Amino acid sequence: MKLDKIIAVRNTKTVYRDNDKVIKLFDENYSKADVLNEALNQARVEETGLKIPRLLEVTKVENKWAIVLEYIEGKTLEQLMKENPVKRDEYFEFFVDLQMEAHAKKSPLLNKLKDKMSRKISQADLNATTRYDLHTRLDSMPKHTKVCHGDFNPSNIIIAPDGAPYIIDWAHATQGNASADAARTYLLFWLNGDISGAEKYLDLFCKKSDTAKQYVQKWMPIVAASQMVKGKEKEREFLLRWINVIDYE
């Protein structure tokens, strides 16, 4: 296993390419349970038939946990959007269709989205009244069992040379309500500074899925609270504005 070609560096892990494999090497103090859960997510979503990199093995390298995946040749959708701005509308259509393809799948053994959101609200640095309001809102939302990526954005889609799209990074996958997943994607566009992209995305998602925009918006304070748990100080003020707007109507 060669670790000499770095393709991505994150706060808690480094991603390497070794010929036809990708090695995701986690920091030494990274939670073993989280590594194994990510690998399990990958395996379970793979069984749905969605185009994703195949899980090859889970191992240890110099006392660090590693997940080894199939390497997918190609460019991310984010790269293609930057390189071909005239095709932006076409790429957004493609992006939403791909997310809805994932939502059409079932994976009964994935963790439940509402359980995950409930834990994150409890962990968020918010006062008891706000947490209570968020838990109450979450409890009132319908329970669904759709495959939700949890971090669906253009950088997590690779377009192979033959045009086939592959969805990567299933660390946050759950089964639950598609509108929660859409609210999360909308938030990610905002956090990336692409406000027009966020609005274009939400309009398209609601149109294609025949979902009321207000329904997706009801999830936004919940997903903002979930994002707050990451502890990124520069996002805190922005996320608090979303969380404190308990009713959009």
Image: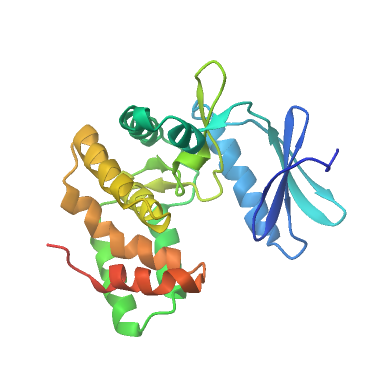
- Left or right: 241 as drawn, with respect to 80: left
> In the visual, does 44 lie left or right of 224?
right
| Residue occupying the far left of the picture | 249
- Residue 208 lies, in percent from the top left, at 23, 32
Percent x, y for residue 179? 29, 47
The percent position of residue 243, horizontal first and vertical second, equals: 30, 70
Q: Is residue 111 left or right of residue 73?
A: left
The residue lying at 64 percent from left, 55 percent from top is 10
Name the quadrant containing residue 120. bottom left
Q: Give the x, y percent position of residue 125.
A: 44, 79
Work out whether residue 236 or residue 228 is closer to the camera in this orientation and state it.
236
Q: Nearer the viewer, residue 228 or 137?
A: 228
The residue lying at 74 percent from left, 65 percent from top is: 29
Q: Nearer the viewer, residue 249 or 201?
A: 201
- Quadrant in the picture for the C terminus: bottom left
Tally of numbered discs? 0
Q: Up-down: is 112 above or below 153?
A: below
Task: Look at the image and tell me in which quarter the N terminus lies.
Answer: top right
- Which quadrant of the structure image shows residue 221? bottom left
Q: How is the image coloured?
A: rainbow
Q: Residue at x 49, y 45 (%)?
A: 110
Is 32 located above or below residue 244 in the figure?
above
